Amino acid sequence: MLVPNLSHTSVDMMGRCARQFYYRYIEGLKVPPGAAFAVGLAYHHAIGENFEFKIKTKQDLATGAVWAIFSDQYEREADQVDWLFEDSDRGNLKDVGLQLVGLYLSNIAPIRNPKAVELEFDVAVPYVERRFRGRIDYVGEDDLYIDHKTSSRKWNQSRADTSLQASAYYLAAKIEGEKPSGFCFDIAIKKKTPEVQVVSTHRSEIQVQQYIDRLQDVEKLINAEIFPKTDPSNWVCSPRWCGYYSACMQGAPYSQLRLLRKDTDDATSEV
């Protein structure tokens, strides 16, 4: 079966560009991480480790300990980045990440009381043959669901209210018989003066059903092996935002791409 499972990451990519989905999930070609992705993964990992500790002890880790976790993870991720293609400086980006970790631990973590971190789900969606899999960043003792983000700019309310990721989490919770008390995006803003933004949102039954419809449509496209290119004017259709651009839009062979071949079995995890 082409693409044995679905995740929000894969569904979101199909919505941006079906041809990009084809390269990543059908051909199994994975673009090496960019600098923004590297700092995001390290930040996400550090915050998650803090909350794992808090579940056991009811206390946050010392800031220095979380900084060390971030630094170790960042260096591992940064080693995979081709910095010749990046506008960011490796050291400066690390400093911003450390500031964001410190801000989160000072201002947000003390009011969070987690009961689960990186909570995995693997559910059957009505009229969708493939399983829908992923991980929820944070579930609080009060059943508040949280997704941790890093961004170069602040979010407005509209962006949070239309984010498909929140719909995906609500769907998974509904199928498993759970009901979030609320949903927040905790967003680390990577700007000259870093800050952490909290944006609350919710999802209606209609929005959850619309996400189911999207999953059904994605599966139909996969089964029909229909993977058209996106509109070239789409912001994602550029060398900066798509690692497959040169092959897709300029006809370059795969051998000239900076790609890592990887099996698609693990391509369903949430990031």
Image: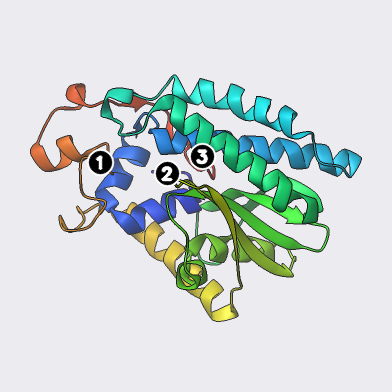
> Disc 2 to disc 1, how far (Cα)?
26 Å
Identify the disc placed on residue 40.
Answer: 3
* Residue plotted at (81% across, 53% down): 113
* Residue plotted at (79% across, 33% down): 62
> Disc 1 to disc 3, how far (Cα)?
17 Å
Which quadrant of the view contains residue 2? top left
Q: Give neighbour class at mark 2: few <14, some 14-19, many 20+ (Cα, 10 Å).
A: some
Residue 65, placed above or below residue 43 = above
| Quadrant occupied by the N terminus | top left
The amino acid type, in three-letter code, at marker 3 is Gly
Mark 2 falls on what kind of element?
A: loop
Between tags 3 and 2, which lies in front? Answer: 3
- Whether residue 142 is visible here, answered yes or no, is yes
Please state if 11 lies on the left or on the right of 126 as rendered: left
> Disc 3 to disc 2, how far (Cα)?
26 Å
Q: Which residue is mark 1?
A: 240
Task: Say whether marks 1 and 3 touch (CB < 8 Å).
Answer: no
The amino acid type, in three-letter code, at marker 2 is Val
Q: Earlier in the sequence, mark 2 or mark 1?
A: 2
